[in-house]
Amino acid sequence: MGDVAVGARSGQGGEEHRGRPAESADRAADRAVPSGSDARAAEGGGMSDDRTKAGDQGPGDPPAQPKQPRSFWKELPILIGIALVLALLIKTFLVQAFSIPSDSMQNTLQQGDRVLVDKLTPWFGSEPERGEVVVFHDPDNWLAGEPTPDPNPLQKVLSWIGLMPSAEEKDLIKRVVGLGGDTVECKGTGPLTVNGMALNEPYVYPGNTPCSQDDQGGQFKVKVPEGHIWVMGDHRQNSRDSRYNQADKNHGMVPVDKVVGRAVVIAWPINRWNNLPVPDTFDQPGLGTSSSAAAVSVAPQGLALVGAVPLVLRRRRRNGAGEG
């Protein structure tokens, strides 16, 4: 009987001994079971990260559809709008086209020529120089009595955005002869003198004399005040310029702030394509030409070009990366 009792106790103790490790193992397993997304990530390996990187597209998902480009007709209004805005900005700040309405600048410019006027350099403080052909607003009713065309609405709109020559009929175009501080004089038939230096003017219309012999302003001696310019047409006997407006409030002078810009190129008609350089006679020693001022008038264009190059290169690199 003693052996039986001992065996029973030993069996009961063995069962208790065997039950404790199992219970501990279950508890450890409960603690080791991953929760929620961890379990799914564990089952799928690195699939969760791969889907995130690939736009939530798994192996069983259908392939992503490429984004459909807009149709040409939907993009056309946007392109037209961008073109119009660019044209307006160019016309306002860079270059504007003007039509020559008269013969006062023959033979340098003919009636009907279209010229491109540089409007950029005045924004950088550059002022007109002797010999330049400039466009300026009517300083004091110089165009009184002149016929003015009546453009149609379409021409007005195209002119306003710069796609056609300016329809503004209150602008004139002449050659700068004197700057602020200069003394300009005409005696007899010429030559025209600036600060006592005679000008050789091959651009004067053939058959004209540099100075006009009349009592209406053709004979003069004036000192140009600071902030003003004295202008004359190349067709000397057919130009109502500073000489014949000395009775106005500016005594024939043109305020610098009335200058729109310098005419640099004859753009139309094609057979008259040409630039409009400053004649050599205005570079003669003793005339008072300032080389530093001339450099200022050129510098902004160079700066604009230098500033544009990095933008172009950056865009090319970006496009190249996109294609790659």
Image (tube, rainbow, N blue to C red):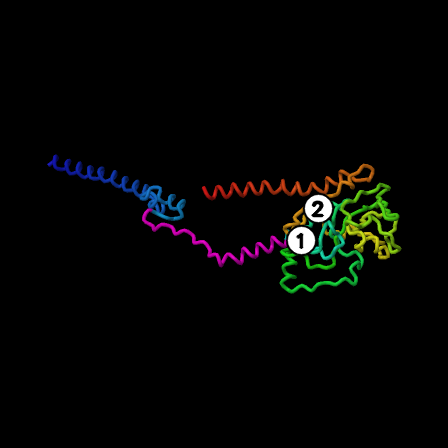
Front in this rendered view, residue 277 or 296: 277
- Amino acid type assigned to the residue bearing label 2 in the image: Leu
Q: Sequence order check: which comes first, mark 1 or mark 2?
A: 1
Point out residue 155 in the picture as x, y percentages from the top left corner: 64, 61
Compared to residue 166, the image places residue 10 above or below, namely above
Tag on residue 276? 2
Question: Which quadrant is the N terminus positioned in?
Answer: top left
Point out residue 302 in the picture as x, y percentages from the top left corner: 66, 40
The answer to whether residue 222 is visible is no
Q: Residue at x 63, y 59 (%)?
A: 158
- Amino acid type assigned to the residue bearing label 1 in the image: Ala
Write down the region rendered in magenta: 59-88
66 is within the stretch colored magenta: yes
Question: Which quadrant is the C terminus positioned in?
Answer: top left
Q: Secondary structure at mark 2?
A: loop
Residue under pointer 1: 97
Question: Toward which corner of the image does residue 298 lie, by quadrant?
Answer: top right
**10 Å neighbourhood of mark 1: few (<14), some, or many (≥20)?**
many
**10 Å neighbourhood of mark 2: few (<14), some, or many (≥20)?**
some
218 is within the stretch colored magenta: no
